[in-house]
Amino acid sequence: MGNKQTVFTHEQLEAYQDCTFFTRKEIMRLFYRYQDLAPQLVPLDYTSCPDVKVPYELISSMPELKDNPFRQRIAQVFSEDGDGHMTLDNFLDMFSVMSEMAPRDLKAYYAFKIYDFNNDGYICAWDLEQTVTKLTRGELSAEEVSLVCEKVLDEADGDHDGRLSLEDFQNMILRAPDFLSTFHIRI
Amino acid sequence: MSCQLKGREEKAGSGVRGRARSSSPGTGDRSRRRPSRKQPPRAERVAGRRGAQPSQKERAEGSPRPGSPRRKQAEHQRLREDLGKPGRSSTKRTCEGRRKRDGRASLKEQRQRAPPKKEKEALRKETRKRPKKHRSPSLASSTSGGESLSEEELARILEQLEDKKKLIATMRNKPWPMAKKLRELREAQEFVEKYEGALGKGKGKRLYAYRMLVAKKWVKFKRDFDNFKTQCIPWEMKIKDIGHFGSSVASYFIFLRWMYGVNLVLFGLIFGLVIIPEVLMGVPYGSIPRKTVPRAEEEKAMDFSVLWDFEGYIKYSALFYGYYNNQRTIGWLRYRLPMAYFMVGVSVFGYSLMIVIRSMASNTQGSTSEGENANFTFSFKMFTSWDYLIGNSETADNKYVSITTSFKESIVDEQESNKEENIHLTRFLRVLANFLIICCLCGSGYLIYFVVKRSQEFSKMQNVSWYERNEVEIVMSLLGMFCPPLFETIATLENYHPRIGLKWQLGRIFALFLGNLYTFLLALMDDVHLKLSNEETIKNITHWTLFNYYNSSGWNESVPRPPLHPADVPRGSCWETAVGIEFMRLTVSDMLVTYITILLGDFLRACFVRFMNYCWCWDLEAGFPSYAEFDISGNVLGLIFNQGMIWMGSFYAPGLVGINVLRLLTSMYFQCWAVMSSNVPHERVFKASRSSNFYMGLLLLVLFLSLLPVAYTIMSLPPSFDCGPFSGKNRMYDVIQETIENDFPTFLGKIFVFLANPGLIIPAILLMFLAIYYLNSVSKSLSRANAQLRKKIQALREVEKSHKSVTGRTTGRDSEDTAQGTSQNATQLPLTKEGMTPHSASQTQTPDKKAEDPGTFGSASGTTLPASQGLSVARPTGFRPDSGHARPQTHPWRSASGKSAQTSPH
């Protein structure tokens, strides 16, 4: 444990354990992952809470994220200013939500934010199109994409306002059998 | 603390109280925020009292008495002072939208509120002029009003304390950024720290503090223990690396790890309770016939080829049933080994059953009802098909392709739902395919039966070749290797949807394995019966040999004859050990075949494809041989059947579980390596989460099926007369009866006899069936109620929506997003009905409240309050998806405030 104490104080570690789904060891591991991304940028001493941000380019180069079509959205949603540059706190937040232990509601809330490309609080047809295009790398024709979007709205839009609100989304995702196992990043 | 109540308080506090104490700004505001349930009546009462004695108040204002009451007073004051803050912050939590503004306003309010409050408190006590001998550290007045107040305060602190603690415990579930979580956490912890000790009275106080201390320590211990536990979970990083191939591959390895854990427990059970005591305390090797290699085998007993077949020294070791002695107790501990052996055999099955069923139950708890999934095909594809675990570009490519095809498939399905081209041809082909597969199954079953029979012939002969000795295992492994691909080829005839096809394929492989295993068992049983029928003659031979040896003439009568060397005693064939050896060999050969397949089929193929690709006519990687896929379903089935063999064999070969632990350990590393080095991910996506219970179900079935033969042998076959812990008994389970008779008091024995009476067992079984029937019907009715509730929620949502549109039109003047905010909150909840009442009430209330007292509300905080409430409601981010309770509570209040925001600024 010796040199771990120098990175965080005991209280910081306890607080992080209260605020995330991680154990002490995992938090340390995450910290070192974070530190590895930009060794010259991130100090090895976090006891005084330095204000450091790792740029999005480095975050998205992590093997956990680099093949994810939604990596930019994920980084934007969890970063403070929506620009994808992350502090350690944001970083921990992100992987805490994505961890196995996080409850379905929390995951659903953030999944909604991720799929809401234009940040307007609703998943509209445009957002859906973006999602499909990212998922299939644009291999579907325009008609197919619009048909799929139409179908999704048809299925999940509970109040028929032509877009998915958070509730519609939660209502739908609550029944998805695979959501918990796929919306999950092991770190 | 429900917000509805708060709503009512709001009326009471600002209406009644505010009117009475118009001179003190902010108090109305403050009491309004108190979450206590008894608040409204008290507020009125206090207010009434106040209203009646305004002069007293003024009189006493300037002259507080010195002394201890004063000190207590101050203490209490501090207490209350801080209560205001937590009260607010808990409000913050439940009504999140308001939080920001509140934080800003709170300082101001506090500054304004504090002095008058203090004075009033002082005044109340002084005017009562009562001795303050209260145990409570808070309010010391002894009038009934004061009493109830202090009780309330306590209750309130307690309540808030509980809230804070809950907040700390659920902090990680909040969808807030980390900075905010940390801040809230610190606040909550400070509050808890401060008030934990202040509660409780007199002696109770110390006890309470002590209890808190213990609770804190306990939490810390639990966390440390959890930390420790996660550190103990093996292969976390390995599985994480594998996870880049997608969740389904990872799920296989997690299953493997789980299996390893179960086997470790079984191993510990058997090793600790049977093998170790026998080795430490039992009679040593070579002392009695069953523990000695017979004279005829002695020369070759140490040869590797013999040991490899589990003959020779291994056969007469503690790894097998036959080695154990039937002495009732062994060693100075008087350890009852036969009893322990039996109980361990039973508990191996008991533990496995329990653990499998428990993990099945926990799997089902997580999943939601399956029935209504059909409505969301496209949505699920859209939002849950990407596997966030994927961190490998090849897997990602595969995933993109499979998602695209699945979208296309569903589009096609949607466009032309079930239009069969030639239904007759398909039917014919399917029947044909099934016929072929049944033929294959029967053929393989017969082949195994034939081979096992032949091997029994071989075992009687001398000088059999290596192939003849291992024929059974070789044939079974070959069948297991070549039948599944054959089935797959036949299944292409059927033209099923891939997912249905996969299920059929799994079912067929399962049937094949099961059929093979059971034919093997049947053949083995024949052998066992043969051996049992020979036993009588062997028994006679042994008896006569010993008799002749001791009574033979030509020996000096005065010196007693040395006992016959155990190696020379003729003995029976010990069918239990034979069965155990069969299972042992089967397991080992299965393991070897698996490894060789991986090595040849995967690794060499991958090497070939990789390196010969430079000098080959066509593209090997994309073309014909390509890389091998990692066959998840086949591997899982293999694992399950292997486990079935372990369960069956472990009673007759206690060492089998140890072998299996080794096997799982090596295959963890070996298969990991193979997957990483030479496999490509499965193209056909097999969903991990859905299938996990499917696998567990198969495991349960296999467990049950492997329980049957063991139970049969225990219950209805007599054990061998000269080997094993139960030798000399009529049946194996007699050991229980023996223990009960000899080691328990007689009345217990009587009770057991009584319990074993069929007259009692049959009603018990009947009762169990009835209970199952009852629970089943209860769960059915519950699920029906569930469905109805869901329907109701849907309907309420519709109603709420129409309601929203109506109110939106009437108050159309307001900005659009305020209305949206309101509706968003209003539609969140199934509790909309309750939401309506405070809703309309506050709507009617607000105007006259405004009219009646502009003083209370209009000053400092009053003016900012409603407006900013409205603002915060409009913020779309002020929504919390977690915590099922908080939402129902927040909503009525928020919709109410939203309303007041809409109506108030005129």
Image: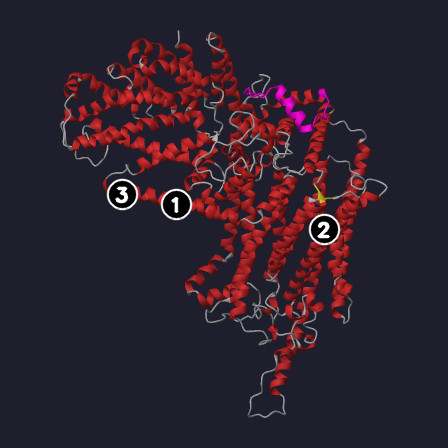
For the question of whether residue B637 can be seen, the reply is no
Task: Based on the picture, tell me whether residue A129 belongs to the magenta stretch.
Answer: yes
Whole-percent x, y for residue B897 in the image = 40, 17
B738, above or below B240, in the image: below
* Marks 3 and 1, the one that precedes in the sequence: 3
Q: Amino acid at mark 1?
A: Trp
* In-image side of A177 versus B516 (left or right): left
Front-most of B45 and A85? A85
* Marks 2 and 3, the one that precedes in the sequence: 3
Range of magenta residues: A118-143
Name the quadrant containing residue B391.
Answer: top right
Dot 3 alpha-carbon crowd within 10 angstroms: few under 14, some 14 to 19, many 20 or more: some
- Circle 1 residue: B218
Numbered disc 3: secondary structure: helix
* Marks 1 and 2, the one that precedes in the sequence: 1
Disc number for residue B206: 3
- Circle 2 residue: B598
Front-most of B310 and A69? A69
Numbered disc 2: secondary structure: helix
